[in-house]
Amino acid sequence: MAHAAPASREVTRQLPRRRTPDVFSARTHAVARIAVPVVLGLIYGYWAAANRRYGGPVTGWNLLFGFVTALVFAVLFAAVWQLGPRLRREQRAVLWFAFTGCAAGFLISQSGLSVLWSMWLGLAVGAGVAATMFYRYYTREDATGRRVD
């Protein structure tokens, strides 16, 4: 059988890097920059309000709590989403760890479980997200933070 000859490192370094095509327009990206945090915030706010009322009736205070929670989550998510690409991969993974850990811990605390249980679950969720994000950034960026797709 015939096999291809291995290419030298010099040849492989000179090949142009191929990026995946961007199928969405600039307008779609601009809309998504606003829509994604808003939609995720509304889902999170509804979830927190549902946890807080324990299956009871929906009250005005419960609605207010849900919308305030949605607003805070959406603002924090948008900040993390926009600030993340400016950081190094380790710092970005820690930022996502802190955000998701706090978000998960807050949701658990609204369900009436103990503060310690909320803390441990928040740490576990945050650690899983941090490991996943670090792996993702480590395999797709070089040491200076440039994408290597």
Image (cartoon, grey):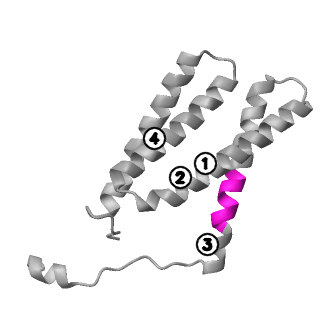
Q: Amino acid at mark 4?
A: Phe
Residue 63 location (% of width, % of height)? 85, 37
Frontmost of labels 4 and 1 is 1
Q: How far, Cα to Cα, is label 4 from label 1?
A: 13 Å
Q: Quadrant of the C terminus?
A: bottom left
Q: How far, Cα to Cα, is label 4 from label 3?
A: 25 Å
Residue 69 location (% of width, % of height)? 72, 40
- Mark 1 highlights which residue? 76
* 110 vs 72: above or below: above
Q: In terms of depth relative to the viewer, which is nearer, 21 or 90?
A: 90
- Mark 4 highlights which residue? 97
Q: Which quarter of the figure has residue 49?
A: top right
Ranked by sequence position, the earlier of labels 2 and 4 is: 2
Q: Amino acid at mark 2?
A: Val
Q: How far, Cα to Cα, is label 1 from label 2?
A: 6 Å
Mark number displayed over residue 80: 2
Frontmost of labels 3 and 2 is 2
Q: Quadrant of the N terminus?
A: bottom left
Asked whether disc 1 touches disc 2, contact meaning CB atoms under 8 Å apart, the reply is: yes
Q: Which residues are magenta?
A: 32-40
* 136 vs 63: above or below: below
Ranked by sequence position, the earlier of labels 3 and 1 is: 3
Q: Secondary structure at mark 3?
A: helix
- Mark 3 highlights which residue? 29
Asked whether disc 3 touches disc 2, contact meaning CB atoms under 8 Å apart, the reply is: no
Q: Amino acid at mark 1?
A: Leu
Instruction: Tell me what residue is drawn at x 76 percent, y 26 percent.
Output: 52
Instruction: Tell me what residue is drawn at x 64 percent, y 72 percent.
Output: 30
Is residue 25 something that shows in the picture? no
